Image (cartoon, helix red, strand yellow):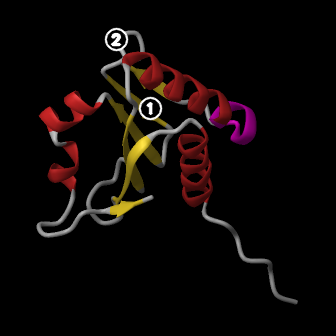
Amino acid sequence: MTAAPQTNVSDDILSLVLNSLEDDKAEDVVIIDLHGKSEMADHMVVCSGRSTRQVAAISEKLTEKLKQEMGVFSKIEGKDQGDWVLIDAGDVIVHVFRPEVREFYQLEKMWLEPGTTGVST
């Protein structure tokens, strides 16, 4: 008898994150694979919202979905300002930026290999 293949929890969290971001109209979503680069998480997702209000709403809805659907209690930083929100969902780290703030920090460039652009959705 063979066991059913186990799904990777970090991949399930990533899938939920991406679906939530799509539902809430996040823009320029980039997925960065952190396997072998960092012990803190398996994936990093960077995206933009058009305004401080949208950034806060995307972040709030995502943390609620993670809690309700997967039992993941995320740590969240920066929601009150709405310029850059960090959501720590364990194996997946999510950064939600206003476009101007994202351009200023260029977080993706710190984590991507030179010459690559990450996986965009």
Residue shown at the point (60%, 27%) measured from the top left: 61
Segment colored magenta: 66-71
Q: Is residue 102 above or below residue 35?
A: above
- Which labelled disc corresponds to residue 20? none
Magenta span dominant secondary structure? helix
Q: Is residue 62 magenta?
A: no
- Which labelled disc corresponds to residue 87? 1
Residue shown at the point (54%, 53%) measured from the top left: 14
Q: Quadrant of the N terminus?
A: bottom right
Spot occupied by residue 18 in the image (x, y as percentages of width and height): 54, 50
Q: Secondary structure at mark 1?
A: strand
Asked if labels 2 and 1 touch by Cβ distance under 8 angstroms, the answer is no
Q: Is residue 96 above or below residue 17?
A: above
Spot occupied by residue 48 in the image (x, y as percentages of width and height): 36, 36
Residue shown at the point (33%, 53%) measured from the top left: 39
Residue type of the residue flagged with mark 1: Ile
Dot 1 alpha-carbon crowd within 10 angstroms: few under 14, some 14 to 19, many 20 or more: many
Find disc 2 in the rendering and name its residue: 81
Q: Is residue 121 above or below residue 82?
A: below
Residue shown at the point (82%, 87%) measured from the top left: 2
Q: Secondary structure at mark 2?
A: loop
Judged left or right of residue 14, residue 1 is right
Residue type of the residue flagged with mark 2: Gln
Q: Is residue 68 magenta?
A: yes
Judge by depth and name the residue closer to the eye, 26 or 44.
26
Spot occupied by residue 121 in the image (x, y as percentages of width and height): 45, 58
Judge by depth and name the residue closer to the eye, 46 or 69.
46
> Label 1 to label 2, Cα distance in Å?
14 Å
